[in-house]
Image (cartoon, grey):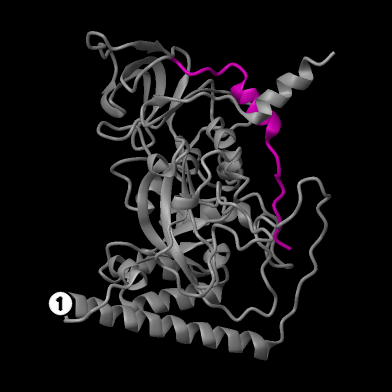
Amino acid sequence: MRARIWRCAGPVLIAGALSAQAPSTSGTFLLRGGAIHTISGPVIENGSILVRDGKIVGLGKNLSAPEGVPVIDISGEQVYPGMIDSASTMGLEKSTEQGRPDSEENGLLNPQLDPAAVVNPADEQIPASRANGVTSAMEVPDGELLSGELSLIHLDGSVNDAMTVAPATAIHLRFPAIQTVLIPPHEPEDDDDQPTTAVEEKVIPYSEAKKAYDGKMKELNAFFEAARRYRQAKIAKAPGLKADRRYEAMIPVLEGKEPLFVTAVREREIRDAIRFADKEKIRIVLADAYEAYKVLPLIKSRGVSVVLGPTLTLPLNRDDPYDRSYTTPADLYKAGIRFSIGTFSAKSTRNLPYQAAAAVPFGLPHDEAYKAISLNAAEIFGLGKRLGSIDEGKVADLIVTDGDPLETTTQIKMVFIDGKPMDLNTRQKQLYEQYRNRP
């Protein structure tokens, strides 16, 4: 059974937020005196970062603040780029008696859907994640086949448009599989007030699973063929062509401008997904590829990037070693495959740094662990020139800490998103203070 083993990080968030208050700036300031972990290059000891209008415009030692620019002394502190959750459903409402969850839609083929448009900016998980150093999240729609566009959001803002960094970075495809035993989700639909119990495996007859697989593959192939015909007709300016939002969303994929974000968990699905990409001549990113370690040469030969699921999980297969999820990041790194880590969760983005940290004792270099939740995540989705590291010209998504942010004892002192200082108060902190001060 696949299950999450960290369900709450309340005490960690409290420790990181107790003394953190937002400095008074307006997107233009100079951070001076800290150790700057650029992630794209060496650490700059006793360095400075000049930010103007939310962008990094200066980086190095002995920088002078222009006239009128406030200086924030961070001597003895550490500065890192803000973390990026490569796969999240945070802020997307769950299913209710009135309908399906915001992350899903009826039907198998909905590539045009935009999850960022329905993110709830008031979701309590957003400030909780932000207070632990996460500044961006890739919102992933979910469904049975083609379920919509991935959108990167900043964890700041009161309206959806203001939160959206990149509205369309990829399209999610849950690749069909012959599943006789269903894979439990990373985040079961359970009530936090109820005890977690083991979930019995639901066994599906092979004939039924094969029929479902064949039906989905038939629909997928037919849809790609129809999308290609639509694109050709549009190029030719065919008279009477009616606009179709589903096919319009597919054009960047067919032209190689965007990848498919392909959920393929087991080895067979991974092989089938790569074969499908070769046939359709499209780019893909493998998502939640638990058994990627079984096909490393194939993935490497195709230049495919991988977004791994959470590291802190139990093994998927009964005969897997206990540390299978912990060792896979190092396996990908040693094979030269670019990868990042996502939570695939609505509630666990706040634990993102610890998902990366869990791989370090099992062979993944520390710097690569932080890359997996920062620069690699940005580069996989074509946003490496804007986010993911501390470099001139990039957005000033920064966190200031008193130590290694992958360690649970580290406190997050300041967080800047797009150069804007964040208030690090959270519901967890409020409850802590409420009960600490009770009579």
Please tell me how many numbered marks the rendered image carries: 1
* Image spot of residue 5 (x, y percent): 72, 48
Few, some or many C-alpha atoms within 10 Å of disc 1 (few <14, some 14-19, many ≥20)?
few
Residue 288 on the magenta segment: no
Three-letter amino acid code at disc 1?
Answer: Lys
* Image spot of residue 163 (x, y percent): 42, 41
Relative to 198, does residue 72 appear above or below in the rendering? above
* Image spot of residue 279 (x, y percent): 34, 81
Residue under numbered circle 1: 237
The segment highlighted magenta reads 1-23
Determine whether the residue tagged by mark 1 lies in a helix, strand or loop.
Answer: loop
Q: Quadrant of the C terminus?
A: top right
Q: Quadrant of the N terminus?
A: bottom right
* Image spot of residue 320 (x, y percent): 69, 64
Q: Mostly what secondary structure, the magenta segment?
A: loop
Residue 388, picture quadrant: top left
Relative to 361, does residue 274 appear above or below in the rendering? below
Horizontal side of 48 relative to 154 (left or right) equals left
- Residue drawn 33% across the image and 47% down it: 383
Q: Is residue 153 visible?
A: yes
Nearest the eye: 3 or 129? 129
